[in-house]
């Protein structure tokens, strides 16, 4: 009798331990979301401080902003997504060349655009988890003498390095990545399915932005 | 409810199966010699049968959609006679073609060029002048006034969407703002002030968006929203009442002021898109589609994208 009871207790505690591990979330979602929010908060503050620093020359701004972009954004992921099915068809040289031009394009376009927006501050409002390591953080761009803009940041946590990177942004619910993908694939398709057409177009666009 | 969902999910793949089979015949070497019209009909039919969008798959496949399919096919035939991009052979090209959902691209681009010209010569300059002479509070009041005029048709669409809660809100806003708010110049009722139209109603009934369409003078649309636009015009209580000569002038004024007022708010955004894009037409198409998606979901977050690259 005594033996049996001991066995039961033993068994019960074993079950309790298993149950405890099953019931407790392996990764607490709230803590994760908070980390993502903190990441976006830091990132947006950095962006505002770079873009509102009017003592910088255009070249200095580009250098600073490109450092900021490569630190906070997963540009290869954005670039690959933007190319759509054509990524598969491209050869290695084209891929490298494209990524190079794409990075420049993103930096110049968005340094320019955000400066025009005259963002005073960014307030992070809320966030929601999409899956284990992807979160969408919602924020509000407060502008000087203009309506505020809803900007959402789609961030992904890397399991390897345990750091966050932005993989897409949504202006008023419209995805930058998807818009680029629609645009780029149309450009390539109308250029006869050749990626070099897009690379040339991006190159000339980059030069134009520099001249302004 | 659950059953309906299951039926939806099972019928649509079957329909898709037929379409894919038909495509096989169409694409194999034994391609039948079809006369011009029939070939276009086939193409349009296949094109709609092969919709690969997951969101559309979820909502598609009911009776209304089948009706819509035949309607849209007929429309496609009519419009293909004026300019239709053909389905490419290459698998990657085909994927991109289907993703763009724009079989009338040549015609649409022509209309888009026309609209851009109209905008640059008339609409944008007018909007700039309007911004210069009407101060921000005045413009905001005009926006609220025009918004208030749209509430009756929003109310009808609320009912058609079975959103009775929002219908009540819409009616309350309309009554209070029209009276105490001096015709809507002041917005006294707080809450969700979204506008609903027939295109959105069709979408909640499960209709696909159909192919992309650029309407002269109006701008980006698609088959569903284009049909909705016609219906909205018929449903709008103001249209029913405003049929004398005098009121026709009022209605025309409302359209013109509405266009200029909207354009004024978009001056910077359009400028931005024009400066940074390589293909403005494709960007506008993408933005319109995403914007409508947001309107249909009433601002709820878009479906989580899958970052699949290959």
Image (cartoon, coloured by chain):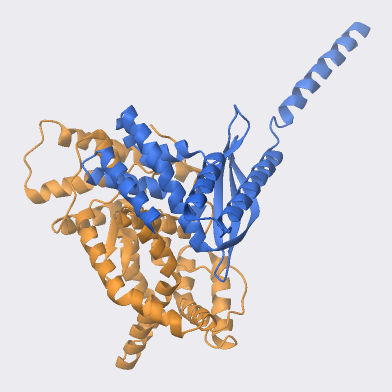
Chain colours: A blue, B orange
Q: Residue at x 32, y 57 (%)?
A: B280
**Which of these two is toward me, B219 or A48?**
A48
Residue A111 rendering spot, x and y as whole percentages: 49, 53
Q: Residue at x 42, y 39 (%)?
A: A79
Q: In this image, B182 relative to B122: left or right? A: right
Quarter where residue A51 is shown: bottom right
Residue A104 rendering spot, x and y as whole percentages: 42, 44
* Residue A9 to residue A22: above or below: above
Q: In this image, B94 relative to A3: left or right? A: left
* Residue B47 to residue B122: above or below: above
Quarter where residue B25 is shown: top left
* Number of numbered markers: 0
Q: In this image, A127 relative to B36: left or right? A: right
Quarter of the picture holding the C terminus of chain B: top left
Residue A69 rendering spot, x and y as whole percentages: 52, 44
* Residue B127 to residue A164: above or below: below
* Residue A172 makes an appearance in the image: no
Q: Residue at x 55, y 58 (%)?
A: A150
**Which of these two is toward me, A97 or A26?**
A97
Residue B47 rendering spot, x and y as whole percentages: 25, 45
Q: In this image, A58 relative to B24: left or right? A: right
* Residue B52 makes an appearance in the image: yes
Q: Residue furthest bottom?
A: B246
Q: Residue at x 40, y 56 (%)?
A: B287
């Amino acid at each position: 009798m005594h033996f049996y009871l001991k066995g039961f207790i033993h068994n019960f505690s074993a079950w309790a331990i298993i149950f405890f591990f099953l019931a407790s979330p392996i990764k607490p979602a709230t803590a994760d979301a908070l980390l993502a929010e903190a990441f976006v908060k830091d990132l947006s503050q950095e962006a505002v401080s770079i873009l509102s620093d009017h003592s910088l020359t255009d070249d200095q701004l580009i250098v600073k902003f490109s450092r900021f972009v490569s630190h906070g954004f997963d540009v290869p992921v954005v670039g690959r997504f933007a190319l759509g099915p054509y990524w598969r068809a491209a050869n290695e040289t084209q891929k490298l060349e494209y990524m190079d031009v794409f990075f420049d394009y993103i930096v110049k376009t968005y340094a320019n655009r955000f400066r025009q927006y005259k963002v005073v501050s960014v307030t992070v409002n809320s966030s929601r988890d999409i899956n284990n390591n992807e979160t969408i953080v919602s924020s509000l761009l407060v502008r000087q003498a203009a309506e505020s803009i809803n900007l959402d940041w789609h961030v992904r946590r890397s399991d390897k390095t345990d750091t966050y990177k932005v993989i897409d942004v949504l202006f008023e619910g419209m995805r930058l990545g998807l818009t680029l993908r629609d645009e780029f694939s149309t450009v390539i398709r109308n250029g006869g399915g050749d990626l070099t057409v897009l690379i040339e177009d991006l190159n000339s666009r980059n030069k134009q932005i520099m001249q302004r | 409810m659950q059953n309906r969902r299951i039926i939806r999910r099972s019928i649509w793949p079957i329909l898709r199966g037929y379409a894919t089979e038909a495509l096989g015949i169409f694409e194999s070497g034994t391609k039948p010699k079809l006369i011009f019209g029939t070939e276009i009909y086939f193409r349009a039919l296949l094109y709609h049968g092969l919709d690969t969008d997951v969101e559309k798959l979820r909502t598609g496949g009911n009776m209304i959609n089948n009706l819509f399919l035949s309607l849209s096919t007929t429309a496609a035939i009519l419009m293909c006679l004026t300019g239709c991009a053909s389905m490419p052979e290459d698998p990657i090209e085909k994927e991109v073609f289907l993703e763009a959902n724009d079989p009338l691209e040549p015609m649409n681009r022509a209309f888009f060029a026309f609209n851009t010209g109209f905008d640059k010569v008339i609409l944008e300059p007018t909007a700039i002048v309007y911004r210069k002479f009407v101060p921000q509070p005045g413009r905001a009041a005009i926006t609220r006034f025009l918004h208030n005029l749209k509430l009756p048709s929003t109310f009808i669409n609320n009912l058609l969407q079975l959103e009775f809660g929002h219908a009540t809100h819409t009616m309350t806003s309309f009554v209070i703002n029209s009276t105490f708010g001096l015709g809507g110049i002041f917005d006294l009722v707080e809450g969700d002030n979204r506008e609903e139209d027939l295109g959105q109603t069709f979408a909640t009934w499960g209709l696909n968006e159909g192919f992309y369409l650029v309407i002269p003078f109006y701008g980006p649309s698609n088959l569903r929203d284009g049909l909705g636009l016609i219906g909205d015009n018929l449903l709008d209580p103001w249209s029913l009442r405003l049929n004398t000569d005098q009121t026709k002038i009022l209605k025309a004024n409302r359209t013109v002021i509405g266009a200029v007022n909207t354009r004024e708010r978009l001056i910077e955004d359009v400028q931005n898109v024009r400066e940074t894009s390589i293909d403005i037409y494709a960007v506008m198409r993408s933005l319109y589609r995403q914007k409508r998606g947001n309107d249909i979901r009433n601002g709820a977050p878009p479906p989580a994208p899958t970052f699949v690259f290959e």
